[in-house]
Amino acid sequence: MLPVALALLSLHASEPVPPAAETIKLDIAAGPAFLQVPEALSGVRGWLPGVALDFDVVVPGAIAKAKAPKQAKRFIAKNGEVSIAPFWLCLLPQEAIIAPGDSLSVFGARWELFGLGMGTGIGPVSVGAHVGLPTVSVTRWSGPALDSLNGARWVANYGASLKGSITLKPCDYVHLEAGWNEQFGYQAGTVRSRLGEKADLWKQGTARFLLHIRIPVDLKI
């Protein structure tokens, strides 16, 4: 009986241990955004309203450090957090401009295909910096403030973006973020004012204000 018992014990010990459930957070954010109008058209409208969106999976630093490749471990603080966005989320725009108007109407969106950011903080306040590469935006400009020979114009931008932000954390599950996103790169398409002045759209700045709701989820990692 002893050999059989030892065999059963050995078999039981060799069974893989299922991973323990860890708590991560789904960070869903939305809020108003305001695209700065280029100088050639700033006399018509100063800002173009829209919506800013964001979505991340927030993983505790200890888990991220344990799962990360050896080369990346030293960049992860064990007592911090790591935000990860699934690649398919690049199909959702980070900003959508919805600005109808009598003199100038603009509609469009901006997408970020890949991004890398980092931040630091003291207490409930943190500051962050983020680089997006590449970024793509498409906008449609129309209205009597534009050159009548141009009519409605489509403009596409392809390049990179730099974002700075400050975040207030009143509690672990609600964060308030204010930031500025500057996109720059190649501009396809031209917009001119009624006076014929060309609007420089190769560089576009957007003010963003987001409410983050962080939903805890138990997941086996």
Image (cartoon, rainbow, N blue to C red):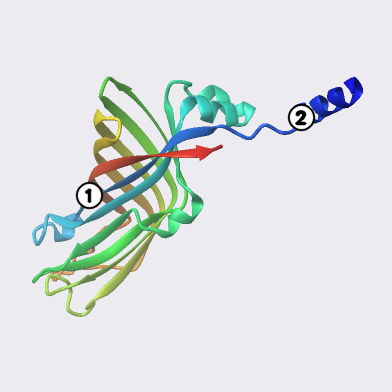
* Residue labelled with disc 2: 12
- Vertical order, 29 against 72 (above or below): below
Residue 119: percent from the left, percent from the top? 37, 29
Which quadrant, please, contains the N terminus?
top right
For the residues labelled 2 and 1, say whether their Cβ atoms are less than 8 Å apart. no
Measure the alpha-carbon separation of dots 2 and 1.
Answer: 53 Å
Task: Give the residue type at disc 1.
Answer: Gly
Where is 94 relative to 152, above or below?
Answer: above
Residue 172 picture location, percent across and down: 30, 30
Q: Quadrant of the C terminus?
A: top right
For residue 24, side relative to residue 126 (left or right): right
Could you tell me the amino acid type at mark 2?
His
Front residue of this view, candidates 43 and 169: 169
The outermost residue toward the front is 1
Residue beneath disc 1:
31
Few, some or many C-alpha atoms within 10 Å of disc 2 (few <14, some 14-19, many ≥20)? few
Find numbered disc 1 in the image and state the secondary structure of the residue it sits on: strand
Residue at the spot 17% in from the left edge and 59% down from the top edge: 40
Label whose residue precedes the other's in the sequence (2 or 1): 2
- Seen in the picture, residue 189 relative to 60 is either above or below; the reply is below
Residue 82, given in percent of the width and then of the height, sits at 45, 33
On residue 79, the disc is: none
Residue name at image x 23 percent, y 46 percent:
208
Q: Give the image location of residue 184, x and y in percent.
A: 35, 50
Q: Secondary structure at mark 2?
A: helix
| Rendered residue at 28%/41% (across/down) | 212
